[in-house]
Image (tube, helix red, strand yellow):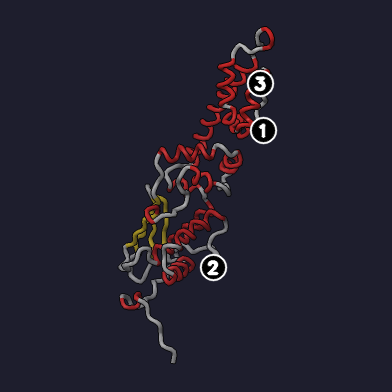
Amino acid sequence: MARRKYSYYDFYYEPTRPIEVDDGIKARSQRGAFAKNWWATRWIQAMERLVDSRRLARGRSYARKGQVRSIEESEGGIRARVQGSRPNPYKVTIQVSPLTDAQWEKVIDALAEQAIFTAQLLAGEMPHGIEQAFQAAGVSLFPDKGGDLATDCSCPDWSNPCKHVAAAHYILGERFDEDPFLLFRLRGRTQEQILRALRQRRRSVARIVRGEVARGSGCTGSQGGTCDHQQEHAAGAARWPEVRRLGRFFHGSAITTPRCRAWSADLQNARKAG
């Protein structure tokens, strides 16, 4: 007879069966992957790196059987009730560290450089390359460090995350499929706040573009074709890479080079240098 392999888990608790419930939240996925979209998959992958395989298997079973009785967004995180082997459901909390205001400003700046990001966010979609925008700001959208994710459960299992936390994570992954902006809220910003900040960037850039074009297009030059506003044109040329990039973002193509020949030459030099 083959000998049973024991783990440290066996010496602490005897295997128990959870109390079955009829009104729990059953996972849509009854086999295979839990998530449909890439952002929900990334969330589940982040969780699976923190939980041992045995508890993951029990967590998946709990999620598919409907042992998660409730799950809701609360201030600063997620609260869930998961039915285990005891009469009262266990209380589970999941918290993701919010980004600071300064970090969010950097993220918004990075998002503002890609027109597709705003278009997809307006359509209620999570852009595929959005992780790169967060990385450019020196942060991560998904929890990638131990301090990014804090979980707790009222069950007697000494391990954290436990199978009850894992079950709540899997159900939460399916919620991300339906509402990708839930992850933004857990990180400290709503969809409306992000879009409002992007629109503010748009108005600011529009003012820059109008100002630069106005300063360049009205110049007639002095005798011999020499420009009378060389200092202003030099400043405009220095800002060209920024204005050109943001002009593409807000108008779909690069802004037109001003008619002033002197500024046009400076701009061309700046473009080659950039």
Q: Nearer the viewer, residue 11 or 165?
A: 11
1 or 3: mark nearer the eye? 3
At label 2, which amino acid type do we have?
Gln
At label 3, which amino acid type do we have?
Pro
In which quadrant of the rendered image does the N terminus lie?
bottom left
Of marks 1 and 3, which one's residue comes earlier in the chain?
Answer: 1
Q: Which numbered circle lies on residue 175? A: none
- Within 10 angstroms of label 3, few (less than 14), some, or many (20 or more) residues? some
In which quadrant of the rendered image does the C terminus lie?
top right
Q: Pointer 3: what residue?
A: 258
Q: At which x and y percent is residue 123?
A: 59, 43
- Above or below residue 20? Residue 94 is above
- Above or below residue 19? Residue 236 is above
Local secondary structure at mark 3:
loop
Local secondary structure at mark 2:
loop
2 or 1: mark nearer the eye? 1
- Which residue is at a point 53% across and 47% down the rendered structure image? 132
Q: Nearer the viewer, residue 122 or 144?
A: 144
Q: Pointer 2: what residue?
A: 30
- Which residue is at a point 32% across and 68% down the rendered structure image? 157
Of marks 2 and 1, which one's residue comes earlier in the chain?
Answer: 2
Q: Pointer 1: what residue?
A: 253
The extreme top residue here reads 223
- Above or below residue 257? Residue 116 is below
Q: Nearer the viewer, residue 3 or 74?
A: 3
Q: At which x and y percent is residue 170?
A: 47, 61
Q: Are marks 1 and 3 in contact (CB under 8 Å)?
A: no
- Residue 6: quarter of image: bottom left
- Above or below residue 83? Residue 211 is above
